[in-house]
Amino acid sequence: MSSSSLRMPLRRILSELAGLLLAASCAGCGEPGELLCTVCRAELTSCRVDTITPDGLTVHAALSFDGVAARCIRRLKGEGETLLAGVLGDALAPVLDEVSASGAIVVPVPTSRAAFRRRGYRVPDLLVRRAGAEPVDLLIHEGEREDQRGLDVRERRDNVRGSMRARHRGAGEQVVVVDDVVTTGATLDEAARALRQAGFEVLSAVALAATPRHRRLIEDSSATRRK
Ligand SMILES: [Zn+2]
């Protein structure tokens, strides 16, 4: 075996080991020792939260985006801690399995080019894989949009509208759209719009986590309806 064929895998192993050592404090509580302590791991048990987007798409979220879950998702999205995708994928799995049980195609929300360049991986795709499903990248971004962070509900909707399209036309195939975090639901609505326009039947959406703000909107609107 030549030295060059050894060098690459060895380098990869060393960089993964370095990652493990650097990550040797709990992502949930900061306790030194392991990537995620037993107490925080238990916090990541899937507790299905159903919400609805502004356009009326049902979203099944596995977790509430606060506490340990929010800190772990930030470490995965912002700090490149891809080792957390395993345990987060475990939380996503039961919800995704149930929603796509009919054989629906699992379509992750596309990652913008800027975000892919920054991270080197696509968070929704990675989570779907770690949840044991096969992501089908049916959607692509049409041009770059402003970062959604800091925009309110209407601004997010305007910003994202027309930003996606399907790679090819469908013939009524059932799909489930998946994103990591649902905030206002504007991104999921745009994904559903693009898929429907291309001829797919969008059953519902699945998110790893729903922000409390999004849940509050839903609770308020259902309270209004009950009056
Ligand atoms: Zn912990």
Image (cartoon, rainbow, N blue to C red):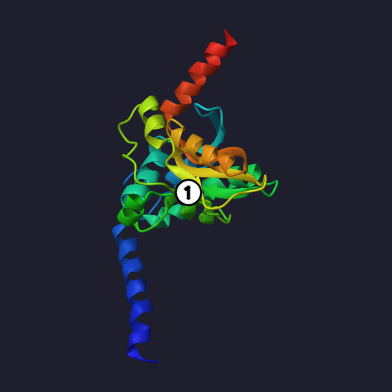
Image position, residue 215 (x, y; %): 47, 26
Q: Answer whether residue 108 is visible to the viewer in this image.
A: yes
User: Hey, what amino acid is under mark 1?
Assistant: Leu
Q: Answer whether residue 25 is visible to the viewer in this image.
A: no
Image position, residue 136 (x, y; %): 55, 54
Front in this rendered view, residue 168 or 129 = 168
Badge 1 is on which residue?
88
Q: Quick one: which residue is furthest to the top in this view? A: 227
Q: Residue at x 57, y 13 (%)?
A: 225
Front in this rendered view, residue 37 or 44 = 44
Q: Secondary structure at mark 1?
A: helix
Instruction: Specify the quadrant of the image occupied by residue 20.
Output: bottom left
- On screen, residue 75 above or below 216: below
Left or right side of 95 for 10: left
Q: Residue at x 36, y 48 (%)?
A: 77
Q: Residue at x 52, y 28 (%)?
A: 55
Image position, residue 68 (x, y; %): 40, 40
Instruction: Specify the quadrant of the image occupied by residue 58.
Output: top right
Report crowding for label 1: few under 14, some 14 to 19, many 20 or more residues within 10 A (C-alpha). Answer: many
